Amino acid sequence: MTFGRNFKKSFRYIAHPLIKDGLYLTHEPKTDFKETQYMAIDSEITDIYKTAYNMTFHHAYLNDSKVSVLKNGESLFPELLDKLRNAEKYIFMEYYIIRTDKIGKKVLNILKDKAKSGVEVKLLYDAIGSVMLNRKFMKKLKKSGVEVVVNDRVYFGVFNTRINYRNHRKITVIDSKYGFIGGMNLADEYNGSSKKFGKFRDTHLLLEGKAVNSLTALFLRDWYYSSHKFIDDDKYYQAQIVNSKGLVQVIPSGPDFDYPTIRNTYVKMINNAKKSIKIMTPYLALDQEILTSLIIAAKGGVEVSLILPGKPDKKTIYIVTKSFFEQLLKAGINIYLFKKTFTHAKVFIVDDIIASCGTYNLDNRSARINFEATVLLHNESVSRLIEDFSEDLLLCKEVTLKKWKKRGLINRLLEGLFNLFSPLV
């Protein structure tokens, strides 16, 4: 009764009609895939974007948006801090996890200073993911002028559904010029300061150009959901063209959509694959559609490679991840475990020409329960993601079917038991 309820029948969904059918996209252009510029692209590529567009109504931006790949916190945080310090008009930030640790305070103190100087600052965080925030610090932040909203505060009681649907997105938008999205939260472990894991392996994206407007719309949609205030003002949608070849599309997903949008887009990408599929994900709890599609692709001669953590952050969920290994290995899918640390990047690359990077894990919670977002890329940044994947493989140990079959009986039993709960993971 807590985990099986339909979000779309909840009061929270009914009370926010503008989140339905892309009605919050008041400044997003419509995408006409019959236009000459779109027709010039391989139809198998545009068909993937068309699938995502018809489910989300988020525009597929062509030749007007630049994407930079930021590998690990050492690349992300200096870039983020610099852009925040130079903000002139507004800063929008939403994160699943914010901690008042070293990097968290560094970012939040900049927000405090910018708010005092007259910059509009809006901060949205998830009540569960950011449960460890220091309340006194946050009170001072609010007093400085930062508008702070919490996504779905949890009031514990019998059959409480609020605990189930979490906002897992990590989005920053600054002055319509810059947009950040990816796997990294605002916490020390994402900045290489984790005592337990050392340096997290993670990937974030920096967007410039027209596609930033799409991230703005998604943030304001989440702000509307959590604050009950819908903001529709031209001044937040002033992104200018940044010339860069290729397609860039922001794809949100969540229980408010009729379909698991990112999952369905991935199924389309897998089914279109001809040569290779490269995946990096921290968690693996595959639903039947993704599992079947990957197996069919591998059996059809597509080289499918998965990079997974060699060091888990959650041991029970790692057992669920390992419960899929034997079936995947039997199908000829390559599994690699990152040896040095935990891998938190969410990267999906098909045929080395189209890729996705964002907040979406390959598990059922990301597919159907959490609010997620990713960016679909068919441009110059794909080559950087491929390069990073190749470098990561050098730091991995391959799992072979022969060795995997030799694992103990207790491990087999645990994997079978925990696999039963994979729909909740």
Image (cartoon, helix red, strand yellow):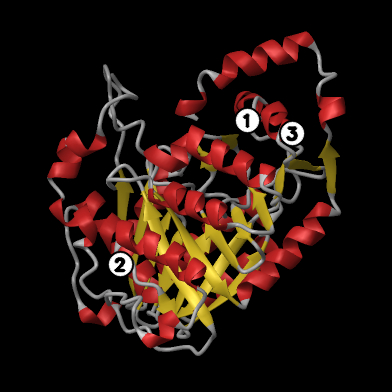
Q: Please give the residue where the numbered disc 1 appears in the rendered image.
A: 314
Q: Residue furthest front?
A: 300
User: Looking at this view, is 340 or 188 the one in front?
Assistant: 340
Q: Position of residue 16 (x, y in %)?
A: 16, 50
Q: Is residue 42 left or right of residue 54?
A: right
**With 125 as the anchor, is 303 left or right in this view?**
right
Q: Quadrant of residue 210?
A: bottom left
Q: Secondary structure at mark 1?
A: loop
Which type of secondary structure does the marked residue at label 3 adopt?
Answer: helix
Note whether 87 is above or below 268 in the view shown. below
Position of 116 relative to 225 (above/below):
below
Instruction: Name which of mark 2 and mark 3 comes first in the sequence.
Output: 2
Residue marked by disc 2:
217
Query: Which mark is on residue 132?
Result: none
Question: Quarter of the image holding residue 283?
Answer: top right
Compared across the picture, whether 401 is left or right of 422 comes to right
The N terminus lies in which quarter of the figure? top left
Pinpoint residue 81: horizontal percent, then vertical percent: 56, 71
Mark 1 / mark 2, whichever is N-terminal: 2
Residue beneath disc 3 = 329
Q: Amino acid at mark 2?
A: Ala
Disc 1 residue crowd, few under 14, some 14–19, many 20+, Cα 10 Å? few
N-terminal-most mark, 3 or 1: 1
Which residue is found at the position 27% from the left and 77% from the top? 29
| 188 relative to 413, above or below | below
Give the Cα distance between marks 3 and 1: 23 Å
**Residue density around tag 3, few if under 14, some if 14–19, many if 20 or more, within 10 Å:** some
